[in-house]
Amino acid sequence: MTTTQDAVTAAERCTPEYRRDPHAVYAQLREAAPVCPMRPPHGNETYLITRYEDARAALSDPRLSKDMYGAMDAYRRIFGDSSVALDDNMLNSDPPKHTRLRKLVSSAFTPRRVEALRPRVREIVEELLDACPTREPFDLLPAFAFPLPIIVICELLGVPPQERPRMQHLSTTVAQTGFSPESKRAQQKAEEDLHAYFTELLAAKRDRPGDDLLSALTEVRDTDGGLTESELVSTVFLLMFAGHKTTAYLIGNAVHHLLSHPAQLGAVRENPELIGPAVEEVLRYDGSVESSTFRYATEDVEYAGTRIPKGALVQIALSSANRDPRKFDAPDEFDVTRPGSKNAHLGFGHGNHYCLGAPLARLEMELALTRLFGRFPGMTLADPAGEPRWMEVPFPAFRGLAELPVVLDPAG
């Protein structure tokens, strides 16, 4: 990277070099342009926040709205009209609506319900590992990292087993949206299919409720009247979408970095109590959510001496904030013994939009990594000297590998 403008261009265009190593770009922006104006391919004026303290403040700044309906022109240019029906949820709202929706969802999505999943998550982990080849290279992402969270979130919600591959396909289509007409058409069709499916499934839960989150949410909707039908369908989509994609990429990132740092993996093996801190360090060092979802300025605001004009979109670079040397010592070092990371990193956000599914993600991560490395102590990357191939996306939302070739038992 030679100039600040080169760094801005790389970030706004998501160049291949940037996708391989966004951290080098963020390091330059934190120093030279910590709040930098960009013009990404969606064409809307956008400001990228890269320093930790600014990011943390912006995540809870009421002047930066999450109600994208308030910025409807910009919203439609980015995501298209078909997204509107699925985005009527707490992620895309401000208080008091956000407060109401989050309280209602939290009443059904309780820590007790999540913890009750522990035995079943452990079973799913073992079943998936049983099916993996042990002596030849294979891609861990489709075999393990992606099926685990999709099975877990579908069981939590009450999605029938035969529908789970379809759910994964449709949500993947939505997540990988680009800006081409073909990509937009695929996104619209996937969103329409998801809306129709969840509408039908919720109607079925009303007739035959079960011990699952959808039945509980349906009861909240019908008994308390606190959720509209549109909000209910959109909330189910949010839980499905957020509940598996981010965790799948996070598992892949964790395995890659632990295998690439043998001393750190050795420390976890010697002291199993480090598995929790190791998960937190992955969230800080290379989490799966690179930037928060869009906000927009409801008035002129100022960060790091830069004025963000009313109506502009704001992107908060969580990956950059989590590598800010002003907050973390030796931030570019992967250290599973790093103290206090859990309460410091922004991997799950901050403020009233802090990730509701964080306890479930932590549970899945800890069980997945414990059993994976416990069952296969000799596990290696299939090509330890090769460069990892990171997923290409049209704007920095997810950070994940495109593939993760490994050998579970090379000595077997």
Image (spheres, helix red, strand yellow):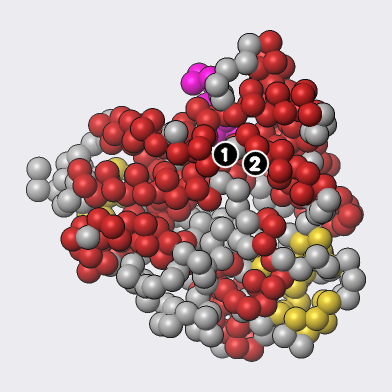
- Direction from residue 280 to residue 205 in the image, left or right: right
Q: Where 333 falls versus 95 (above or below)?
A: below
- Main SS type for the magenta part? helix
Where on the picture, by quarter, is residue 2?
A: bottom right
Report how far apart the C-alphas of labels 1 and 2 lie in the structure: 6 Å
Residue type at tag 1 = Thr
Task: Categorize mark 2 by other alpha carbons within 10 Å: few (<14), some (14-19), many (20+).
Answer: few
Q: Looking at the image, which is closer to me, 117 or 302?
A: 117
Q: Looking at the image, which is closer to me, 343 or 174?
A: 343
Q: Are marks 1 and 2 in contact (CB under 8 Å)?
A: yes
Residue sitting at 72 percent across and 49 percent down? 91
Q: Looking at the image, which is closer to me, 27 or 301?
A: 301
- Direction from residue 60 to residue 333 in the image, left or right: left
**What segment is highlighted magenta in the picture?**
160-172
Residue sitting at 32 percent across and 56 percent down? 275
The magenta stretch spans residue 151: no
Q: Which residue is mark 2?
A: 106
Q: x, y (%) of residue 231? A: 78, 35
Q: x, y (%) of residue 168? A: 54, 34
Q: Which residue is mark 1?
A: 110
Q: Which label number is shown at residue 312?
A: none
